[in-house]
Image: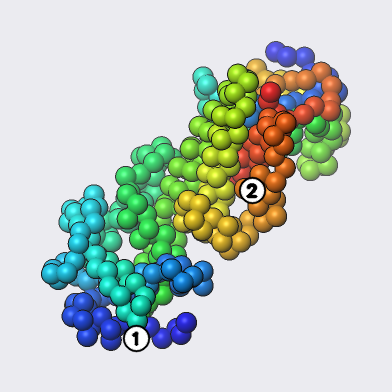
Amino acid sequence: MAVIDDTTVPVPKLEVRVRNVRGVIRIAVPESAFDLSETAGFIWRRIDGRRTAAEIGRLLAAEYEVTAEEAVADTKEILASLAEEGAIALSPAGPQADGVG
Amino acid sequence: MSDDRSYYLEELRSRNLLPDSHLCVFEAGSLVRGWGNPSSDVDLYIVSEEPWDGPEARSLNVPLTKKDIPSVELFVDGMRWDIKYWTDQQVDEVFEKVTWEAFERAAMDSNDLNYIERWLLHRFGFAVAASGQGWLAERGEQLKQSAFPAFLISQALNLADSRVEDAVGQLQAGDLESAVLSGRAAFAYSVDALIAYHGEYGQGSKWRARRFRAAEPALLSFEEYWGLETMQSYDPADPAAWVNEVLPVCRAIAMEVSI
């Protein structure tokens, strides 16, 4: 499992297929497809190649009224899982351009 | 144009082009939408219980039990009229292809509608009756309840995905010109999906700008859309920058539109 710290920047992989199936985000990577939980979907929508894991975690905390510490920890766990699935790339620190080439 | 379309009925009747048993005569197309221009046609649909067997018709092929749609073209006061004769049974069969069960069976992929059937369905979204208002209103409601929009969105997103993947691969290979063309195609399909999600079911470039304005998607302003459609930020010295600008928009659209 990837190690993610506060300054890690998750970067979208543009070639990953995404669908919104009646509000649920479905991700398709070459080997599999899976649906995101509500929390993971919230995080996914905020991955823009610029926000750090901690920044996304703080947005999660504000949305769900949990502590920042708890939200950032959850965010890192979910980002690690998404990276493991090949749905996102991880960059050590931002800001990063969202793109290829 | 007047909302009174009885003129069409009188003209059709005088030319023996209106079956007595018709259930509905409706107009659809750019004129109805207020998008007409001097080269626009009057697009009329006549739906009856019995097939039309008028001698002047040519046939359009459809993959239905009755496999042809008779079509008549004529000029009235210098304007071209395009008249298509459907049976009620054919319309039923088209709707049977876009049930939610059919959508699930297709695994959110394509359907076997041809372009004539797609035109019919998307035109139910804005058609105006010259007669048979009740019949047309029921079909319009049937369209809203159908999976037709979901089919359109899925197909457009699938096509967009393929072009995005092409663009990404081409960028990685340094084939920038091909990547730009793939990015353009991806964006076009993505926009078609977005505006279908907002109730504009036509496809293709001809009316895309009009349809975009009518759809008014919150995700993308018209100015943003138009800037990408016309490649206003494209820099010949850095083609990849434009591709990297447009592909995230395609991705955002895929997340926005619910199927």
Residue B253 visible within the image: yes
Q: Amino acid at mark 2?
A: Thr
Residue A74 visible within the image: no
Q: In the image shown, does A64 or B202 lie closer to the viewer? A: B202
Relative placement, left or right, of B48 versus B247 is left
| B1 versus A78 height, above or below | below
| B118 versus A72 height, above or below | below
Determine which of the numbered discs, if any, sits on residue B230 in the image: 2
Q: Amino acid at mark 1?
A: Ser
Q: Residue at x 32, y 79 (%)?
A: B76
Residue B112, quarter of the rendered image: top left
Q: Residue at x 45, y 61 (%)?
A: B144
Relative placement, left or right, of B55 versus B218 is left
Mark 1–mark 2 Cα distance, whole angstroms, equals: 42 Å
Chain letter of mark 2 equals B
Q: Residue at x 23, y 49 (%)?
A: B63
Q: For the residue labelled by badge 1, is the local secondary structure a helix, a strand or a loop?
A: helix
Q: For the residue labelled by badge 2, is the local secondary structure a helix, a strand or a loop?
A: loop
Residue A32 spot, x, y in % from top left: 52, 23
Foreground label between 1 and 2: 2
- Residue at the disc numbered 1: B6
Residue B182 spot, x, y in % from top left: 55, 34
Q: Residue at x 38, y 83 (%)?
A: B5
Residue A5, quarter of the rendered image: top right
Relative placement, left or right, of B41 versus A66 is left
Residue B108 spot, x, y in % from top left: 43, 40
Determine which of the numbered discs, if any, sits on residue B237 in the image: none
First in sequence: mark 1 vs mark 2: 1
Q: In the image shown, does B249 or B137 lie closer to the viewer? A: B249
